[in-house]
Image (cartoon, rainbow, N blue to C red):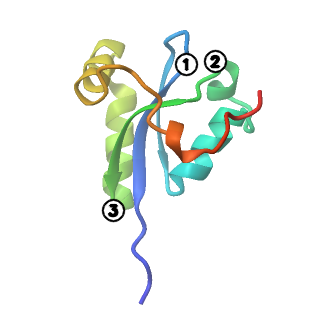
Amino acid sequence: MRKRKTYLVDILGSLSGTLYAGIASCPKRRTSQHKRHAISGFTSKYEIDRLLYWESYDDVRKALDREKQLKGWRREKKVALIQSFNPEWVDLSRSWFSEPAAR
């Protein structure tokens, strides 16, 4: 029997407050890439490396639809969502890694 895949729709942020909505099928690996700025682009440019919010889906279509919805939201709505889930804005992935990612 095939293991059912899980997709994480998330909002990540930088210390300066820039937000990014994304999707990952391997959230630990993808978050590590963000922390190491291993992939050039928006998240690397703006040093986005803190997992602030997430939702889990087992249907990739639903996950992609939700990611698209979050990307279309104004900043204020994303901030309210983060506040409702993570009022202290702590990095929810902090316990995933044994040591801080090198910069």
Q: Position of residue 100 (x, y in %)?
A: 67, 34
Q: Are marks 1 and 2 in contact (CB under 8 Å)?
A: yes
Residue depicted at x 70% and y 35%: 101
Q: Would you name the residue on which mark 2 appears?
A: 46
**Category of crowding for the residue at label 3, using alpha-carbon neighbours closer than 10 angstroms: few (below 14), some (14–19), many (at least 20):** few
Q: Which mark is residue 58?
A: none
Q: Which residue is mark 3?
A: 59
Q: What's the distance in space between the residues labelled 1 and 3, CA to CA?
A: 28 Å
Tell me the amino acid under the disc marked 2: Tyr
Query: In the image, which is nearer the foreground, mark 1 or mark 2?
Result: 1
Closer to us: 90 or 29: 90
| Outermost bottom residue | 1
Q: Earlier in the sequence, mark 1 or mark 2?
A: 1
Q: Which residue is mark 1?
A: 14
* First along the sequence among labels 2 and 3: 2
Q: Residue furthest front?
A: 98
Mark 1 → mark 2, Cα distance in angstroms: 7 Å
Quick check: 22 left or right of 46?
left
39 displayed left or right of 69: right
The amino acid on which the numbered mark 3 sits, given as a three-letter code, is: Asp
- Element under disc 1: loop
Q: Is residue 6 above or below residue 2?
A: above
Residue that extends furthest to the left in the rendered view of this protein? 84
Answer with mark 1 or mark 3, whichever residue precedes in sequence: 1
Rendered location of residue 102, percent (x, y):
76, 32
Q: Are marks 1 and 3 in contact (CB under 8 Å)?
A: no
